[in-house]
Image (spheres, helix red, strand yellow):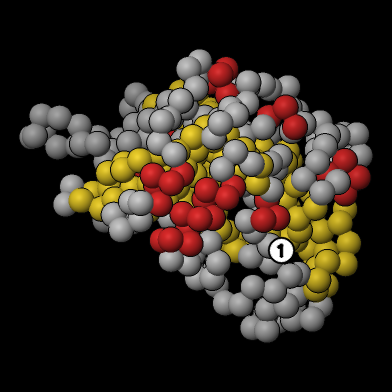
Amino acid sequence: MGHRKKSAPRRGSLGFRPRARKKYPVPRIKFWPEVDGAPRLLGFAGYKAGMAHMYVLEDNEDSRWYGKEVFVPITIIDTPPLTVLAIRAYEKTPEGLRSLCEVWAKDIPEDVKRRHKTASTSKIKPEDMKKLIDRISVIRAIVSTNPRKAGIRKKKPEIFEIEIGGGTVEERVNYALDILGKEVNVDEVFKEGEYVDVFSITKGKGFAGAVKRFHVKILDRKSNKTRRGVACIGPWKPTAVMYTVPRPGQLGYWQRMVRNLRIMKIGDDGKEEATVKGGFLRYGVVPGKYVMISGSVPGPAKRLVKIRVSARKLGVVKPPQITGIVLTSQQ
């Protein structure tokens, strides 16, 4: 606050508390929106490679630049196929969702054992799951990434759940059992022009002070004791510092979500179509399938990024009219 008789906005949103370091570099998705149409996976995952930019024709009729060529920054995400390891069914109870049953694929990839040494040997067969359709309310696929097919030196995959939406419960069960044990590509889940929500873990900055962490004002040169801190951290009583007061601590390595980023392009040959000359810094070459998303995505290169169907729909989905993609060297 600049002056005692004037007000200033509070420093730091209380919606992002506690600002603690994330335990794992894998984001969690706790909400899956409802969709119409045929059954499909509601999300995907990939590895952040880097950024570039492209030129497109503005297709927003409310924009003053409608019909003209505009500059759009993009993030390239390396998206190797996901392997569907198992299908898990949930039923609704007064206490919330409860796991009802799960069916595992017969052949589990060897790399999965790097994450879980004992792969599940479920005795439940697909026919048994179909008998429980009346009790099933939610169907989710347990998938694993394939980092060997990405442009990073990594072997251990990440394993997580993705919900299946669209259609009736019976159609979802049939679709889930159909993709069990198979690989799913990103173009089977999303299409160009679609708006998505992106989840990732931000860059870790370590221990930081109140000025860098909360952007509080640096005190006057003649201030007593500290300058890069909060002048008054609270009243005499209660005899404790409130959690709302900006204090030094962990900066970064938090989970963050960015809503309604647009998928600009989905391709198969990332080496020729999505890799900057000389390769991305701290990543290298995108070898296979990729996704170009408008704007920036949280996290550094090589960080796992989860992509989900947008929870807040924005109009009709139509592919962008790309006039050029700039992939000049970053070095």
Q: From the viewer's side, name the closer residue of 243 and 123.
A: 123
Q: Which three-letter amino acid code belongs to the residue tagged 1?
A: Glu
Quadrant position of residue 281: top right
Using residue 121 as the reference point, say whether residue 13 is left or right of it.
left
Helix, strand or loop under label 1: loop
Q: From the viewer's side, name the closer residue of 326 and 233.
A: 326
Quarter of the image for the C terminus: give it: top right
Which residue is painted at 72% across and 51% down in the image? 291
Residue 3, given in percent of the width and then of the height, sits at: 32, 50
Which residue is at the far bottom?
Answer: 61
Q: Which residue is mark 1?
A: 192
Q: From the viewer's side, name the closer residue of 14 and 233.
A: 14
Quadrant position of residue 328: top right
Quadrant position of residue 32: bottom left
Which residue is painted at 48% across and 17% down in the image? 118
Which residue is painted at 56% across and 31% down in the image? 106
Q: From the viewer's side, name the closer residue of 171 and 10.
A: 171
Q: Is residue 185 above or below residue 325?
A: above
Which residue is at the far left?
Answer: 237
Residue 307, given in percent of the width and then of the height, sits at: 57, 50
Which residue is painted at 16% across and 52% down in the image? 94
Q: Is residue 260 above or below residue 4?
A: below
Task: Tally the marks.
Answer: 1
Around disc 1, counting alpha carbons within 10 Å, would you say few (fewer than 14), some (14 to 19), or many (20 or more)? some
